[in-house]
Image (cartoon, rainbow, N blue to C red):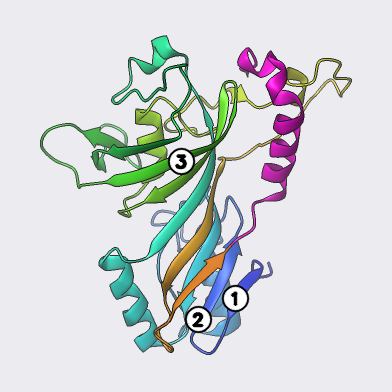
Amino acid sequence: MPLPPVLYEDDVLIAFDKPSGMLVAPDRWDKTRENLMGLVHAKMGHGVANVHRLDADTSGLILCAKTKPALDFLSGQFQSKTVGKKYHAMVVVLPVEEAMKVVVPVRGPDGTLPDQFTIDLALGEDEHQPGRMRVFRKRGGKPCVTEFRTLERFGRFAWVECRPLTGRTHQLRVHLAAAGAPILNDPFYGDPEIKLLLSELKRRYKGRDEEKPLIGRLALHASELTFKHPGTLTPMTLMAPWPHEFEVALKYLRRFGAGGRVGQGLRKR
């Protein structure tokens, strides 16, 4: 399998646009599963190392270092939380009566997500569900803070910018679920049966009997990183374009989402 698209490369750095479904590093249980760093090492040698990770189902920007000094310099920035990280997500805004059952219900006066909100909830491993994380209200867990900005609203869906100030496993997914707005197609913290369908948006939809969702994977994308370059020491920003299916979904939501049907359009299959 070829390497994912290269977003940036110089003598000490290389950044990839990782597709959804691809592991960054070898799976701890199944070492035969294909992963990004396995491909990188096979084609570029073992001197290249990933500086950070993404969930397998999250697409977007992955930064790698080509030298040990560059790796140490960049890792130090991630550890000191001086790296600016930006993600984008399509979320399902739960009805108010359901949102009241979540940990930190977030709503504006009209019942929609506010323009900006911050989630500050400690997270840790869920001892009852291996591989998942959960909120710790009192003791336990590690501090986690995420800033969110609602970019566009489409009835029961919203397009959200996420800026994690910490870097915990599944942080964005758990924080959004705790706020009553789980990420679309999240099998762990949302309702995987809820689909974003064109037939629910377009009044006179004439499609196939077996309609495919506009977005068929976890609707979370790592869009941007800002950090100091290990060679020049100057700030730089790298960006990963939104996946094509996100662009298509936004196009249809912008065209038809304001017509009212999206407010009812959460159909389970």
Residue at the (80%, 24%) spot, across then down: 210
Amino acid type of the residue that numbered disc 2 sits on in the rendered structure: Leu
Looking at the rendered image, the quarter that the C terminus falls into is: top right
Q: Position of residue 254 (x, y in %)?
A: 71, 32
Outermost residue, right side: 206
- Whether tag 1 and tag 2 are in contact, CB under 8 A, the answer is yes
CA separation in Å, label 2 and label 3:
30 Å
Label 2: few (<14), some (14–19) or many (≥20) C-alpha neighbours in 10 Å: many
| In magenta segment, residue 220 | no
- Numbered badge on residue 13: 2
In the displayed structure image, the side of residue 238 where residue 228 appears, left or right = left
Q: Which residue is mark 1?
A: 8
The first of marks 1 and 2 along the sequence is 1
In the displayed structure image, the side of residue 54 where residue 196 appears, left or right = right
Residue at the (66%, 68%) spot, across then down: 5
Front residue (pair 35, 115): 115
- Numbered badge on residue 149: 3
Is residue 33 visible to us here?
no
The first of marks 3 and 1 along the sequence is 1
Give the magenta range.
240-268
Q: Nearer the viewer, mark 3 or mark 1?
A: 3
Residue at the (31%, 51%) spot, across then down: 168
Main SS of residues in magenta: helix
Q: Nearer the viewer, mark 2 or mark 3?
A: 3
Q: Position of residue 100 (x, y in %)?
A: 34, 15
Q: Secondary structure at mark 2?
A: strand
The first of marks 2 and 3 along the sequence is 2
CA separation in Å, label 3 and label 1:
27 Å
Front residue (pair 138, 254): 254
CA separation in Å, label 1 and label 2:
8 Å
Looking at the rendered image, the quarter that the N terminus falls into is: bottom right
